[in-house]
Image: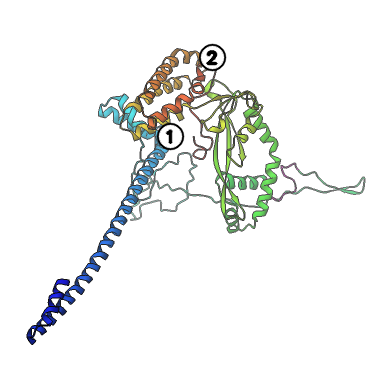
Amino acid sequence: MDTIQAACAQLAGHQDRYVQKLSEVIEQADRQRDIECGKIQARLSKATSEIKTLRSELKRTRRQVEDLKAEVAEQTARTAELLHEQYSPKSETAKAKRRQGAMRADDQREGSDPALSRQFKSYAAVLPPRPRNRNGRGAKNWDSLERIEVPMEFPETCPCGCGGTIRNYDIDEKREVIPAKFYIAVRKYPRYRCRKDDVTVGTLFKPTLMPGVTSGTSMLAYLVTMRYGWGMPMYRIENMLNHSGITYHRATMCKQIGRLAAELWHVTSELQRHTLDDASRIFFDETVLKILRPGEGKTGHSYMYAAHRDDSSFGGNAPRSTMFFHRTSRSMAHIHGILGGKSLIVQHDGYAGYGRLGQLGTEVENIVSVECWVHARRNFIKAAQRMKSILPNEVVEIMSQIFEIESVLRGRTPDARLAYRKERSEEVIQRLYFRLRELSSSTLKQDRLRKAINYTLERWDSLTLRLCRILCLTRFFTPLGSGLRT
């Protein structure tokens, strides 16, 4: 640009008028070109900055996509885990039992190795089967219901007038319901005129659980069942009763249920004595229980602890019982408060709150702490589902031998169980221990298999305590179905 402008300045001083005009034209054209170049350069610079911005945005979006993919993979694994817990052969549902039989039939038809199929199929997430039909008919699984014949009016002979009689009947069965009937029970207690003393003599009322309350025992049982059995809130129960023509305020329900709980405390105390004081072994677990937080606009978390006594697997004839304790948190202090001063064998899920059970100098020093083989095996099952190695399945297969031995022992006396375990289980457990030690030295510290191994070895003494003591089941319990699940 500078060279062209200098040349134009020299030409402008030329004597020829034409040359002077030509230099002016060249100078203006050069300046216009420079202006256009400046604009193009500005647009190019702006486009370059936009490209940089888009590239950084693209990188950020790609990172978000990767994070979302990782989250989807994690949720998929969690879904598979939940499906396994609900629909696997170990599930307590009837459908799971039927699926287990179908899987065994498939193994026999395919001719596959039963040990290999047990490794992979038994612990894989099994999806629920699709329904047989789509018209909403449903299966007729109502054999336990009473059948009431509904009177039907039909002619005794053929409608065409030929005189043919009834040969047989087509049966049409449908489920029906008689809604709950609410009524007022009126009991008349006579009042006598006593001629001897010239007074009126009344009759003593029959004793009831809560005298002076306007609700009978059946109504109280209905309220408690609807509230705690079916988990319905008080306002919904109130609305249901209002639709039935009964005015029953929530405040009245709460007061009567609270008084009922106080009246039944002696029953609760007897249940607690039978479950904790008279038992030699129990299962212990806890679960989250949501409670209302008035004024906070949200629900809060509390915990329900469950102590379960079941001696049937040890040849005992004591009734089964489950005692629930409501506490505000999952603190170790609550566990010690429930089990303090007791002499029990307590089987639990390995939560850290049970870590001081049996420790000398504590209020729970007489507790024998026993952990659960199912929880130890579950870690290897998760590792087998997420790793491409056969080593976790190998450990699960060894553990399955322990479970098979325990299934044979179920229902036998403690002495017979202990002798059989020393004869059959000891060799399997020693083999498992040495295999875990061998794998521990050859796996990475952050590996899923290594974490499962460490979890088992850290609890080895508590897990193998059953070889030297008369102990409890290897499987844990579910006191509230899916509500308290371990």
| Disc ID at residue 28 | none
Q: Residue visible at 66% across and 47% down?
A: 257
| Residue with the most extreme right position | 197
Q: Of label 2 and label 1, which has the lower sequence position?
A: 1
> What residue is shown with label 1?
91
> What residue is shown with label 2?
415
* Quarter in which the N terminus is drawn: bottom left
Q: Is residue 18 left or right of residue 486?
A: left
Res. 1 visible in picture:
no
Task: Give the quarter of the image for residue 115.
Answer: top left
Q: Position of residue 191 (x, y in %)?
A: 82, 49
Q: Is residue 287 left or right of residue 196?
A: left
Count residues near mark 1 (Cα–Cα under 10 Å), then give few for <14, some for 14-19, many for 20+.
some
Q: Which residues are magenta?
A: 206-216
Quick one: 16 or 160, which is closer to the camera? 16
Rendered view: 102 above or below 328: above
Q: Residue visible at 8% across and 87% down?
A: 17
Predominant SS along the magenta part = loop
SS at mark 2 in the image? helix
Q: Position of residue 304 (x, y in %)?
A: 58, 39
Rendered view: 17 above or below 323: below
**Residue 213 belongs to the span the image colors magenta:** yes
**Residue 123 belongs to the span the image colors magenta:** no
Q: How is the image coloured?
A: rainbow
Mark 2 and mark 1: Cα distance apart in space: 30 Å
Q: Position of residue 447 (x, y in %)?
A: 37, 32
Report how many numbered discs are placed on residues in the image.
2
Q: Residue visible at 28% across and 56% down?
A: 55
SS at mark 1 in the image? loop
Res. 99 visible in picture:
yes
Q: At label 1, which amino acid type do we have? A: Ser
